[in-house]
Amino acid sequence: MSIGIIGLPNVGKSTLFKALTKKEIDISNYPFCTIEPNTGIVSVPDERLKKLADFFHSKKTIPAVIKFVDIAGLVKGANKGEGLGNQFLSHIREVDAIVHIVRVFEKSEIVHTEKTIDPLRDIKIINTELILKDMETIEKRISDLNKEIKSNRKEAIAEKEIFEKIREELDDGKLIIQYLKENAEKLDEKALSIINQIQFLTAKPIIYLLNSKGEELPKDLLAEIEKQNFSYLTMDAKENLEISELSQEEKKELGIKETNLNDLIKKSYQILNLITFFTTGEDETRAWTIKKDSKAPQAGGAIHSDFEEKFIKAEVIQWDKLLEANGFQNALAKGLIRFEGKDYIVQDGDVIVIKHGQ
Ligand SMILES: Nc1nc2c(ncn2[C@@H]2O[C@H](COP(=O)(O)OP(=O)(O)O)[C@@H](O)[C@H]2O)c(=O)[nH]1
Ligand SMILES: [Mg+2]
């Protein structure tokens, strides 16, 4: 699962990326890695994991992770290949969600490509590029569907209608994700699967990150946030980077507890529609990530592909119940451990033992 950091030049993308990836990982056994210069793995802070690991005296603690990608190169006209244009857009296509940074901080010596500070305008510039690219994709799809209609593929007629509706919305400057949210009840599974076949850029969940030193947020921006029900966070990227470069001792001395980078990581996890389940014991306590509404065999599959195919049952208990009961044996004796079959929908915070065949 990965999150792309996007925004106009000089808004703080690389600053945020560095802050995220330099963040000292408080769980010692997880090797932080930067896969490529612009791609990094970040551990997801989770109190529950630590409590389980402490209780079981686990030798290893392994957090859930998400990947962040610093996607540079977006300027006006990117959809026509300006700047790094198409390359930039193909990077966005590969991520599962977007952190869209906008500049709220003043500071005149840092060049703003649009000269003035106007976050809402900047958001619209970027979103327009994404919309134009999706329009191009949709035109192509509609023209293909026209051919299919001619050659008598009946389903193509309904599919074309779906895409024409989306084209209208894009024409109005709406992102597909907004359209999907507003029409969640009207769109059936079939329509959704037709839309999801195409990796639309504007169908990805977005967090707007307002990079600010605490400047007042412009009224038009606040109004838009309210109207569109944006998911957003205010953060000082530069300060977060400076803090992430301090050691634990230095932080203690200065009385700095946590940066709001953790909020961003947690929020990212939420918009990806993920949940965490745990495996725990003396050897290792580990947080695993799966899509919300996954069933027990898929949880097994996250651990090992064999566990999905040869799944028999899952022993399940919520993490806090396990701790309250003082461990597996007592929990079992008290009847708190449930035996769930292949249709069980895994819940966030479940501790799971998968039983599988050979
Ligand atoms: N004052 C201030 N400067 C910032 C902040 N974030 C980034 N900058 C500065 O703005 C410049 C561009 O930042 P950078 O992260 O490279 O922008 P990018 O082009 O979006 O990757 C750098 O000189 C940063 O130090 C911030 O929150 N406050
Ligand atoms: Mg950069």
Image: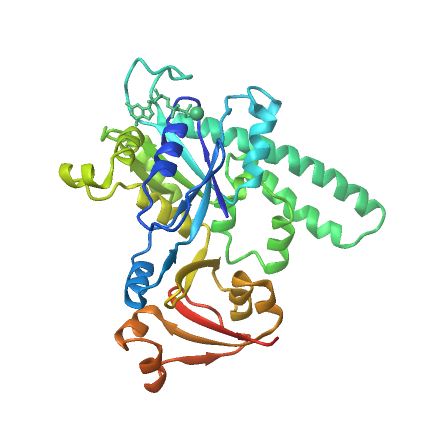
Indicate the position of residue 42 as horizontal and vertical percent values.
41, 44
Vertical comparison of 234 with 59: above or below:
above
* Closer-to-camera residue (77/10): 10
Indicate the position of residue 200 as horizontal and vertical percent values.
59, 41
Q: Is residue 222 left or right of residue 100?
A: left
Vertical comparison of 236 with 309: above or below:
above
* Closer-to-camera residue (217/235): 235
- Which residue is pictured at 74% across the width and 38% down the height? 143
Please state the quadrant of the image where ligand 2 appears. Answer: top left
- Count of marks, rendered view: 0
Residue 278 occupies quadrant? bottom left
Specify how the rendered protein is coloured. rainbow
- The C terminus - image quarter: bottom right
Indicate the position of residue 112 as horizontal and vertical percent values.
38, 17
Return the residue found at the far right. 151
- Which residue is pictured at 40% across the width and 69% down the height? 351
Indicate the position of residue 354 as horizontal and vertical percent values.
50, 72
- Which residue is pictured at 35% across the width and 41% down the height? 232
* Closer-to-camera residue (167/134): 134
Vertical comparison of 289 with 26: above or below:
below
Q: Is residue 185 visible?
A: yes
Q: Is residue 140 left or right of residue 303?
A: right
Q: Is residue 224 visible?
A: no
